[in-house]
Image: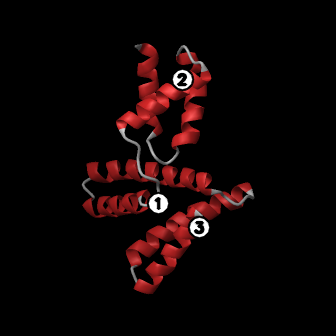
Amino acid sequence: MSLKDRIQDDMKTAMRAKDKGRLGAIRLILAAVKQREVDERIELNDSQVLGVLEKMIKQRRESLAQFQSAGRDDLAAQETFEIELIQSYLPAPLGDTDIDALVDNAIAVTGAHSVRDMGKVMALIKDQAQGRVDMATVSARVKTRFAG
């Protein structure tokens, strides 16, 4: 079963359970997926759906920070709920040792020697770890590896 099918099944389950909060958040996910499919005139595969989910989480984290600084706890709670729901569709996150192993492997495979080769390294890691790790964290580790 594809990730998109799983999300649609969860929407049907939420409808049957009359869980309005969960249903609304799932509809937002499906709307974002459908929008990208219409814009690009393609059917998204699982890795592309993961990309949409990661983008949605990033947007919600930014909104969450703004709502918290403005003292809007009600809106912050909604954003937190949506982040947790979206994260439930992502694969299990990688641990620190797994990230380090990915970075070491990518550097070895690409033959990277300096920060100039960082694009090659990051492209390889992104394919392998999409949805499982924040790419900003990986980027910082790659820079540290080249600096050290």
Residue 31 visible within the image = no
Which residue has dot 3 on it?
Answer: 1
Q: Position of residue 65 (x, y in %)?
A: 33, 48
Q: Which mark is residue 109?
A: none
Q: Amino acid at mark 1?
A: Tyr
- Above or below — where is 29 with respect to 146? below
How far separated are the C-alphas under marks 3 and 2? 34 Å
What crowding class fits label 1: few (fewer than 14 Cα within 10 Å), some (14-19), or many (20 or more)? some
Asked if the residue under mark 2 is in contact with the one under mark 3, i.e. CB atoms within 8 Å, the reply is no
Q: Which mark is residue 89?
A: 1
Asked which colour scheme the image uses, the reply is secondary structure
How far separated are the C-alphas under marks 2 and 1? 29 Å
Task: Name the secondary structure under disc 2.
Answer: helix
Q: Position of residue 134 (x, y in %)?
A: 44, 41
Residue 125 found in image quarter? top right
- The residue located at (51%, 80%) in the rendering is 12
Q: Amino acid at mark 2?
A: Ile
- The residue located at (52%, 68%) in the rendering is 7
Upstream in sequence: badge 3 or badge 2: 3
Residue 71 versus residue 37: which sits nearer the camera?
A: 37
Residue at the extreme right: 41
- Above or below — where is 12 with respect to 129? below
Residue 40 found in image quarter? bottom right
Task: Name the secondary structure under disc 1.
Answer: loop
Q: Which mark is residue 107?
A: 2
Upstream in sequence: badge 2 or badge 1: 1
Task: Name the secondary structure under disc 3.
Answer: loop
